[in-house]
Amino acid sequence: MCGRFSLTVSPEAIAQQFNLSQVPDSQPRYNIAPSQNIATLVKSKEIPEKQFQWMRWGLVPSWAKDIKIGYKLINARVETVTDKPSFRSAIKQRRCLILADGFYEWQKQGKQKQPYYFQLESGDVFAFAGLWETWNSPEDERVISCTILTTAADAVVSPIHERMPIIVPSQHYQAWLDPEITTPQDILPLLSEGDRDRLQAKPASTMVNNPKHDSPALAVSAE
């Protein structure tokens, strides 16, 4: 799974990497947690260019009765995404890029869990494969939320954890967002090619376990 990640690069670096004319100002974030607003890119038939969009992390289906369901839907397994009622519509019509420059996974070490921080070797910003939905609360509050697709861990991540978030290959950003592609069989194979073999891992501080902690020190183990 993916339960924490980071986005610490400047808005200018994001704009350059994703060919955007403008990115909102934001502070570096070293410990992004579920239910927080996260940076995404979306497209639609009405707006064919990529658009920056803040979304709540933890997908809330349109039919949900309570926003708390989002805590259970921070991730979507790619193997079953077309079958689950919470995701099968979004995979066809509402895909997004979730911006990040690193993520955390935890390794069981006896009774303890040691967090590890993963980045591309280049340190560049990248994008997770995401799905999104719009939900209206009983008070008529409109909430746009999203989930991160996960897959079986690769050779770098598997010694630490059995699952990992899917990083969209940069050459497939446009196709992943394309609202004209509505068949999962056409879009999901694009995710099998990626930058995952360029990941590097290092032990991180257990302070990351608490979402109130947010500093560069989280990506460095105290040991």
Image: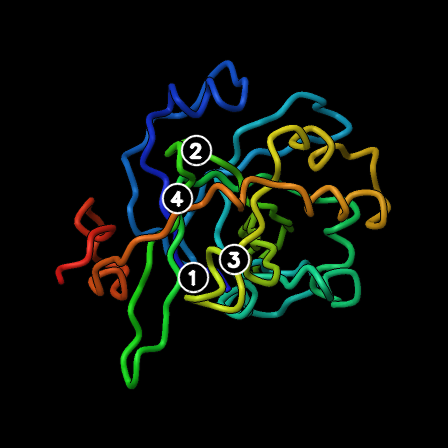
Counting labels gives 4
Q: Earlier in the sequence, mark 2 or mark 1?
A: 1
Real-space Cα distance between discs 2 and 4?
9 Å
The kind of residue on which mark 1 rests is Gly
Q: Earlier in the sequence, mark 1 or mark 4?
A: 1
Q: Earlier in the sequence, mark 2 or mark 3?
A: 2
Residue at the spot of label 1: 3
Residue at the spot of label 4: 119
Nearer to us of marks 1 and 4 is: 4
Is the C-beta separation of discs 3 and 1 under 8 Å? no
Q: Which mark is residue 155?
A: 3
173 left or right of 55 in image: right
Query: How is the protein colored in the picture?
Result: rainbow
Residue 174 in percent (x, y) is at 69, 28
The kind of residue on which mark 4 rests is Gln
Q: Earlier in the sequence, mark 3 or mark 1?
A: 1
Real-space Cα distance between discs 1 and 4?
15 Å
Is the C-beta separation of discs 4 and 3 under 8 Å? no
Helix or strand or loop: what does disc 2 sit on? loop
Residue 178 in percent (x, y) is at 75, 32
Residue at the spot of label 2: 125
Real-space Cα distance between discs 4 and 3?
14 Å
The kind of residue on which mark 2 rests is Val
